[in-house]
Image (cartoon, grey):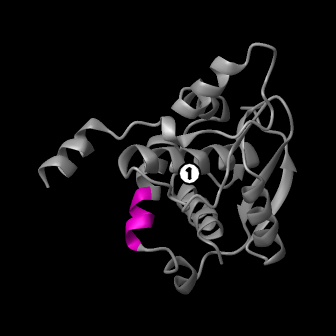
């Protein structure tokens, strides 16, 4: 199983603890994107070893890699997807559910420090509505950069540049003094 697939399963299990039974594809994409953004901000490098690429789309960043991971998890009987109408979004959404609770062996595939990092991102963003998540995502440096280039409409398929994310000043001090 890839780190992305493990992250998706862990994210689904953790948001359940935050009171969400499922995530829409849009929510999942945005949370995975924010995990990557925060990794660049606080660690200075990719959470996914640059194996997950994000491109601009009409509702923010998307990733073919996430679609593939969702398919793998669906066919591996880890998740199920249901089309549902929810109050927080105008259109029916594809809700992703854990098909079965993760076994201890499944949970132990992610390193403890990865789990802690994911949980820190989810504690900030995991309870947000789709609209609020979209707002947060659009305020990130890679999305701000691409929006500045959009003079004649959305640059669909434009690869997002995570190199625009500055390392957090508090962490710069830790690294400088450490």
Q: Residue at x 82, y 59 (%)?
A: 81
- Is disc 1 placed on a helix, strand or loop? loop
Q: Nearer the viewer, residue 49 or 170?
A: 49
Q: Which residues are magenta?
A: 112-117
* Dominant secondary-structure state across the stretch colored magenta: helix
Q: Position of residue 90 (x, y in %)?
A: 82, 28
Quadrant where the C terminus lies? bottom left
Splitting the image into 4 quarters, where does residue 138 fall?
Answer: top right
Query: In the rendered view of the protein, which quadrant contains the N terminus?
Result: bottom right
Residue 174 seen by the camera? yes
Left or right: 57 as drawn, with respect to 54: right
* Residues packed near mark 1 inside 10 Å, few (<14), some (14 to 19) or many (20 plus): few
Q: How many marks?
A: 1
**Mark 1 — residue?**
19
| Residue at image point 82% right, 66% down | 71
Give me the residue at 37% from left, 52% from top. 43
> Residue 95: x, y in percent?
77, 51
The residue that appears at 72% across and 43% down in the rendered structure is 26
Q: Quadrant of residue 168?
A: top left
Report x, y in % for residue 7. 58, 64
């Amino acid at each position: 199983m890839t780190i992305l697939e493990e992250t998706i399963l862990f994210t689904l299990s953790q948001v359940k603890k935050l009171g969400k039974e499922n995530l829409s594809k849009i929510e999942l994409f945005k949370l995975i994107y924010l995990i990557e953004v925060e990794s660049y901000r606080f660690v200075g490098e990719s959470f996914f070893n640059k194996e997950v690429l994000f491109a601009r789309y009409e509702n923010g960043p998307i990733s073919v890699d996430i679609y593939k991971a969702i398919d793998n998890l669906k066919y591996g009987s880890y998740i199920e997807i249901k089309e549902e109408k929810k109050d927080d979004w105008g259109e029916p959404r594809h809700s992703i559910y854990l098909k079965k609770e993760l076994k201890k062996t499944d949970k132990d595939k992610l390193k403890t420090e990865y789990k802690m990092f994911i949980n820190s991102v989810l504690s900030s963003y995991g309870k947000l509505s789709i609209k609020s998540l979209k707002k947060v995502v659009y305020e990130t440096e890679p999305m701000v950069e691409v929006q500045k280039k959009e003079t004649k409409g959305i640059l669909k398929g434009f690869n997002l540049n995570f190199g625009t994310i500055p390392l957090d000043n508090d962490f710069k001090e830790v690294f400088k003094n450490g």
